[in-house]
Image (cartoon, rainbow, N blue to C red):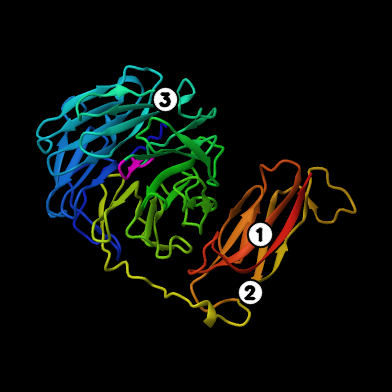
Amino acid sequence: MRLIFISIYYLLFSIVASAQWVQQTVNTKASLRGLSVVTEKIIWASGTGGTVIKTADSGKTWRVMTVPGAEKLDFRDIEAFDANTAYILSIGNGESSRIYKTIDGGATWKLQFQNKNETAFFDAIACWDAKSCIAMSDPVGGKFLLIETKDGENWHVMDNSKMPLAKEGEAAFAASGTCLITQGKNNAFLVSGGKDARVFRSRDRGRTWQVSDTPIMKGTAGSGIFSIAMFDEKNGVIVGGNYEEPAERNDTFAMTRDGGVTWQLGARPFGYRSGVAYLDRTTIVAVGTNGADVSYDRADLWDKFGSENLNAVVAIGRNAAWGVGPNGTVLKLNSNALARQHEDYDPDKMPDCHLCNVTAITLSRRLISSNCGQPEKECLSDRKVEVRTTAIELDMPHEYVYRVTAGKIVGDGPTVIWDLTDAKPGKYTITAGLNIPYLSSWGVFGQTRTESVVVR
């Protein structure tokens, strides 16, 4: 998807960006989105201006490269395998979508693929190994377009006759290089946004595909799924939201435990997120324009850390997790500083009233109409409803969680605004609950309450 941001240059200094992120010294103006973590020492990244950067010593020194002939290209994705071998993919209409490869550490780059289809727009590349890769374009003729290489040299258009049709207005986001990933020996996953937010999955290296609906927000050009990460064949997570409303938290995270067949909402990260990565089986990091979040419990609860604007995050363990962003931002995660700030809670040790947390929801109005008249005392044309939630406060990490059947929630905590500006006439409900670390489902702990509003 044509997601392109304008950046302003500043030179990075070796300072601590926050308690958890260590900012790197990289002499570049580029906005970075492609990121490949090969080992704890070898990291590659790519971005605007035909830029590729690399370290082979855990970030002590960085080499900044400009690919010859690609000075105007935006490399949104990179797949590296060692200090010498890497593929890079640039986005853009027509011939701007390209794939280059180096086998000598970036000293030279070979143009392997240049798109000739003027209706195609490539978003990402993913590889099972150094010779077996696929790349994807936004839908052409109603289906996502795929190309592949089996020898690490030659690329061919794949038969996509066994891929489900894309919906009108459905595409992918070239935001972090993780809208397309591989997993295991043969699995591939592709995520979409726009008019729909779905997960496409293949078990045979892209020959056949199935698709699943998800609860991630959708419906506008800037909303949908932006990133997917799979810990293993069964367990995975997706993040997204609406990049035009980066503070919106609802329906921005979901998880699967059956290999992507079904997806369930989890607790809410602190806004739109364009990248997500596993540090280990139970620790997940998500990043976006307004900062990063960490979950220590398979995303039943998120803690926010740092406010750095980041586009992508990639990890191959707790000691090799990196993030990149605009203006040459490169950050290394300090896993020691990312110590768990809360403890696990034993349900048997909870207060006696642990099943009656939310006791009431008070709405500022229950009727919204553009034709108000007596005796409809609660009738107001303003479509924003104040919601006050009364709950038994717990002396442990927790947050308020809201689910609505229309509109959106603005704010956090026990008092929020339920914005029904775009809601059609009908009856809509809001459910409030408390979220704490140790329970799953959609993070709700104890008893919830539900109330309704009528829109005329």
Q: Residues within 10 Å of mark 3 (few under 14, many from 20)?
A: some
Q: Which of labels 3 and 2 is toward the front? A: 3
373 vs 178, left or right, is: right
Q: Nearer the viewer, residue 285 or 291?
A: 285
Q: Position of residue 12 (x, y in %)?
A: 21, 51
> Residue at the location (38% across, 72% down)?
341
The region drawn magenta spans 177-185
Q: Residues within 10 Å of mark 1 (few under 14, many from 20)?
A: some
Residue 431 - label: 1
Residue 160 - label: 3
SS under mark 3: loop
181 vs 270, left or right, is: left
For badge 2, the amino acid type reads Leu
Q: Which of labels 3 and 1 is toward the front? A: 3
Residue 183 in the magenta stretch? The answer is yes
Instruction: Say whether marks 1 and 2 touch (CB < 8 Å).
Output: no
374 vs 227, left or right, is: right
Measure the C-alpha gap from mark 3 to mark 2.
50 Å
For badge 3, the amino acid type reads Asn
Label whose residue precedes the other's in the sequence (3 or 1): 3
> Image quadrant of residue 319?
bottom left
Measure the C-alpha gap from mark 1 to mark 2.
16 Å
SS under mark 2: loop
Q: Position of residue 186 (x, y in %)?
A: 33, 39
> Residue at the location (35% across, 46% down)?
311
Q: Is residue 72 visible?
A: no
Q: Nearer the viewer, residue 330 or 139?
A: 139
Q: Position of residue 371 (x, y in %)?
A: 83, 43
Residue 263 in the magenta stretch? The answer is no
